[in-house]
Amino acid sequence: MATAISLFPIILLIWLMTKKSSMPSFQALPLVALILYVVKLVYFDIDANLVNATVVNGLLTAWVPISIVFGAIFLFKTMEYTGAMDTIRTWLNGITTNQVAQAMIIGWAFAFLIEGASGFGTPAAIAAPILVGLGFKPVRVAILCLIMNSVPVHFGAVGTPGWFGLGKGANLTDPELLAVGQQAALIHGVAALIIPVIALTFALNWKMVKRNLGFVYLSIFATIIPYYASAQVNYEFPSVVAGAIGTVASIFFAVKGYGLCKEDGVGAPHSAISFGKIFKASFPLWGTVAMLLITRIKPIGINALLKSNAPMFHAGLGSFGDLDVSRALVINVSGIFGTGVNFSFASLYIPFLIPFIFISLVAFCVFQAKGEVIQRVSSESISQMRNPTLALLGALVFVKLLMLGTPEVKANTIIIGTAFADVFGGAWSFLAAYLGALGAFFSGSNTVSNLTFGGIQASIANQLGLNKITVLAMQSVGGGMGNMTCIHNIVAVCSVLGLKNSEGYILKRTAIPMVIYGVIAGAVGYILLSLG
């Protein structure tokens, strides 16, 4: 009975968001969180103070991803309305006439970079219109961009699915997060040898793709090698680094014609934009990358300063708890409702104020933006965040309640994990990625998928005696491949391209490479588990 009741809110959430007249995530997630809240109080009979403190912790914790998403949207709207994005589009359009090269530069490498810096469906929304402007068919472009935006996702939005999704969802330490990222990069890297080629066949004639496979693999390796290498030392910026290197290298290969078939077009069709102009227009991108690297590489020393807990301000909040603010603006709320539940928000370290908002403000000055441009960027960013904010508030409360347990009452994640381990046994190594994909499908986010299922996957690994790191890597890889079929991403890219009633058509086609991706992830995961 405990297993059925624990599974009920998750099954209900899946049904609400996938039924014919589906409920949007910003409604479904708060609803199931409310249901789980009642279940915790009534059926599991957990102390009301502890349950309420967990709810408050979830509501506060949600502002971490909310702030990151807002900052990313703010940055890219800044680029759009200051004209920087138009300049970048024009420059990219003039590099080569070869459509395979165009698809790999923009749909693969450039989107890889955008995913690393922003995530949350932004890559497809930015890359797809550029490709349509180059003459690609909109529906085919939508499919290509959705499939391509899978490999970099574990390290998307500065590694948010990993350090936040699994860090909170499975309570991982820094060394464990690094180890998960290393294995996720390996699994994604193997899949990258096949998935981009499959994506190209949905958008272009196979004969054309085959003639230009040399360039395709030059572009893939130029991205995947730095991707895997940087994942060995950091779990936040591998996609940023790989996307930047891959984009530059792919452009170089295209200009030189390496691996391209001449009959399909090779060189730039018209004079390129000057280096100075493109350097200025791309400032928000390279400025963000540079600031991320400076603040994330620990030997530089800024990393520790931004997370410093040196006290600056303290206030008692009565029964609510205690508030402490450090000199680095790290906000800590401890002893919520007299329990051991605490919350922390590193304002300057979380990629919100630094780098997204800071770089955006500098960009306003660089591009001499007028007041109406700044107002438009601000108002549209806030407006676009309304529904995601509700969804993330509900998601974090839901996840925190799923993970809530006491010495007397096991957490729902543990109950579900035990049941799954008993049913699937050793076959779980081939199914773990699909659970991650399911989470991304109904939630629209690898981060939320990891938050929801990270604890369950860790519990299953423990029950079956499997390596927890490998299983969690497969969970996050699954969340990445689930981006292909995520309803939210499909709707977003269709809206950007002006496509009507195409969502079902696209979903049926992206499901094919998603299943193939899962087979690859299962095979590599099985080997990793066998080795150790």
Image: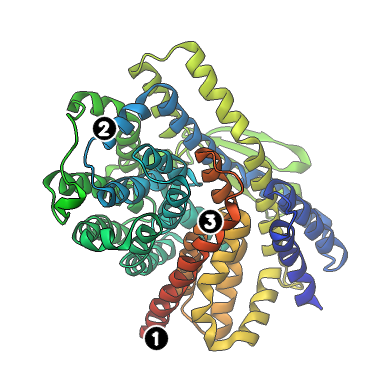
Residue toward you, 56 or 145: 145
Q: Which is closer to the viewer, label 2 or label 1? A: 2
In this rendering, is residue 270 above or below 444? above
Residue 394: x and y in percent read: 70, 49
Task: Using the numbered discs, state the Cα–Cα distance from disc 1 to disc 3 in whole angstroms.
Answer: 36 Å
What residue is drawn where x is 65% and y is 86%?
423
Q: Which residue is mark 3?
A: 506
Q: Is residue 172 left or right of residue 116?
A: right
Q: Position of residue 512 (x, y in %)?
A: 49, 68
**Quarter occupied by residue 67:** top right
Which residue is more in the foreground, 76 or 107? 107
Q: Amino acid at mark 3?
A: Ile
Residues packed near mark 2 inside 10 Å, few (<14), some (14 to 19) or many (20 plus): some
> In this view of the protein, can residue 520 be seen by the observer?
yes
Residue under numbered circle 2:
91
Say what amino acid the circle numbered 2 marks: Trp
> Position of 258 compared to 462: left or right?
left
Q: Quadrant of the C terminus?
A: bottom left
Check the image and report above or below for 196 versus 274.
Answer: below
Number of other residues with Cα within 10 Å of mark 3, as a class: few under 14, some 14 to 19, many 20 or more: many
Q: Which residue is mark 1?
A: 530
In space, the residues marked 2 and 3 are separated at their CA atoms by 29 Å
**Among numbered discs 2 and 1, the one appearing first in the sequence:** 2
Name the mark nearer the viewer: 1 or 3: 3
